[in-house]
Image (cartoon, rainbow, N blue to C red):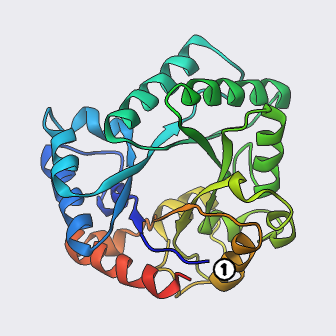
Amino acid sequence: MKIDSLGNCPSTLLPDPMRVDADSFRGYINATAQAGFDEVSLWAFHLMFAGPQAANVVLDSGLSVRAVEAAISWTSGPSDAARAEVAGLVETGSQFGAHIVGAACLGPIEDQSAAADGLAMLAEVAATADMVIALEFLPWAGVPTFSAANDLVVASGADNATVLIDAWHWVRQPGGPDLDALRSIPGERVAYVQMCDPGPTPGEDLETEAMNDRRLPGVGTVDYASLWSALDHIGSSPFVAAEVFNPAMTAKGPVPMAAAIHDACWLQLP
């Protein structure tokens, strides 16, 4: 397995990823490009708050947009709101030539069948633009493990529904890394891998830890060699992007943070 390009989730370069304006958006895009990244995964709502030139900032940077994130309104089943949300993400992604729409479940799932139908609806809309849905599992929420995400993807019946593996979630998922499950699925099932590293001991609140204490790849507990080997075994060719939430690093500014993340990631790539 050989990975020749590397992406970044540049929202992580912000002191508060939920708050962005035109200047901070331009800053994190330029820092990502300056660090040597090739591609990005964009939080679509950032574009709404980054001013009318936001799209041009991205296009002028030379960065390719591989993914837009994230659909979150689908878990109770198909609805007008969920369809409108994913349609907006697909429209945003299409203007940049993106191939992936991220999806996640932020709370509990009360009806697995309804959730599978909701995921199928996301995939149906994404297919109109030749895009795939990449479902991210979150250890504290209704899709807590890789296997749970894969099961939901299979239940959706959608050929363009896939799984997103975030390395932090991969380690912190209940039961820990599940290489046997990963090695048992088709390679195209994994469309997106996010790089970061957790510390040796889980925090008291996993969600808080996930948003505040991610380490540079290679200085935590992710066994990247085994992860890449399993992905190579199934013939997967995922989009790979860094996602390092770390306030101590953001305090140093987006340029040095992006450079440190870029260099650490390349040392762990196959």
Number of numbered callouts drawn:
1
Judge the density around disc 1: few (<14), some (14-19), many (≥20) Cα neighbours within 10 Å: few
Residue 164 vertical position relative to residue 80 in the rendered view, above or below = below
Find residue 172 and report its image quarter. Answer: bottom right
Whether residue 6 sits left or right of residue 149 in the image: it is left
Q: Nearer the viewer, residue 83 or 129?
A: 129
Q: Which residue is mark 1?
A: 201
Q: Residue 253: tell me if it is visible.
A: no
Whether residue 120 sits left or right of residue 13 in the image: it is right
Q: Position of residue 20 (x, y in %)?
A: 25, 45
Residue depicted at 43% across the width and 65% down the height: 245
Residue depicted at 33% across the width and 54% down the height: 64
Residue 133 vertical position relative to residue 185 in the rendered view, above or below = above
Residue depicted at 19% across the width and 43% down the height: 21
Q: Amino acid at mark 1?
A: Thr
Q: Nearer the viewer, residue 16 or 83?
A: 83
Q: Residue 171: tell me if it is visible.
A: yes
Residue depicted at 66% across the width and 39% down the height: 160
Q: Position of residue 45 (x, y in %)?
A: 35, 36
Residue 55 vertical position relative to residue 246 in the rendered view, above or below = above
Residue 113 vertical position relative to residue 93 in the rendered view, above or below = above
Q: Quadrant location of the C terminus?
A: bottom right
Q: Position of residue 231 (x, y in %)?
A: 70, 70
Q: Position of residue 182 (x, y in %)?
A: 79, 65
Whether residue 94 sits left or right of residue 134 in the image: it is left
Is disc 1 placed on a helix, strand or loop? Answer: loop
Q: Quadrant location of the N terminus?
A: bottom right
